[in-house]
Image (cartoon, grey):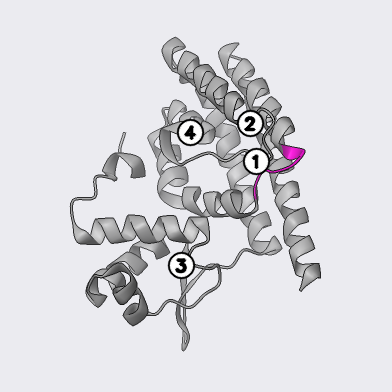
Amino acid sequence: MNSIFETEQAVTSADKTFIKMRGDIVEGNIVAGSKLSEAELSTKYQVSRAVIREAINRLATCHLVERKANIGARVVGLSPEGLVELYQVRESLEGMAARLAAKNMSVDEIGQLKELLNQHYEKVEGSESYYQEAGDVDFHYRIILGSKNSHLISLLLNGIYHLVRMYRVQLGMAGPRVSTAFDEHKNIVSAISNRDEELAEMLMRRHITYSMRNIQTKLTNEKNRR
């Protein structure tokens, strides 16, 4: 399956720069909404402006960067409106992925998904946050791959995955949401394990809706503090 993470072998300077910049945007090290200067980034990452230009173009295809006339390239902003639009698409596509995962994941893959949750439990027990790295250690990533639908995988992983992660990492699960989100993950895995396609989709959609509301609250609170 040709996904973003199977092409993550950074063989060129351009690949390495793109992956590093993408991570810095997702993590908030490059601030949401900030203007991107090729000259400044060239100095920061110690590469040519041509390499930075290529990285910015690739980041635009990941929906992490936007270009505007007379302004240039900017990191996308995190807004309540952008969140709603993104999560409406995410709810639909990941709901479908969960339905297909319940049908198509192998017994071994489901066992590995359960083991991943066990590892997550050790991290979230008594913790104030529930942070998941990208790729195979991300619960949602595993289910997306488990759908076994190449078009769906491409739409999610090569399309909106890192923009979703940007919201999740910078405004995601913390406080009381940690335990409830983990329980929701367990229920989704149970439905997949039982091959209950309809329930798996419903639970995933509900989980993403709850996550969106959690982030909405944080965005609203931040806006009110300004």
N-term mark: 3 or 1: 3
Locate residue 180: give its quadrant: top right
Upstream in sequence: badge 1 or badge 4: 1
Residue 76: mark: none
Q: Are marks 3 and 1 in contact (CB under 8 Å)?
A: no
- Relative height, residue 171 to residue 106 (above, below): below
Q: Between tags 3 and 2, which lies in front? A: 2
Look at mark 4 in the image and give the residue it sits on. 144
**Vertical order, 152 against 27 (above or below):** above
Residue labelled with disc 3:
65
Q: State the image quarter where residue 16 is shown.
A: bottom left
The CA span between labels 2 and 4 is 22 Å
In the rendered structure, which disc, 2 or 1, sits on the residue that comes first in sequence?
2
C-alpha distance separating marks 2 and 1: 7 Å
Q: What residue type is labelled 2?
A: Val
Furthest toward the bottom, the residue is 70
Mainly helix, strand or loop, the magenta region? loop
Q: From the viewer's perspective, tell me whether residue 216 is left or right of residue 49.
A: right
Residue wearing tag 2 = 124
According to the picture, the residue beneath numbered tag 1 turns out to be: 129
**Closer mark to the observer between disc 3 and disc 1:** 1
Residue furthest front in the image: 126
Q: What residue type is labelled 4?
A: Ile
Residue range highlighted in magenta: 172-177
Mark 2 touches mark 1? (CB < 8 Å) = yes
Cα–Cα span, label 1 and label 4 = 23 Å
Q: Does the magenta stretch include residue 143?
A: no
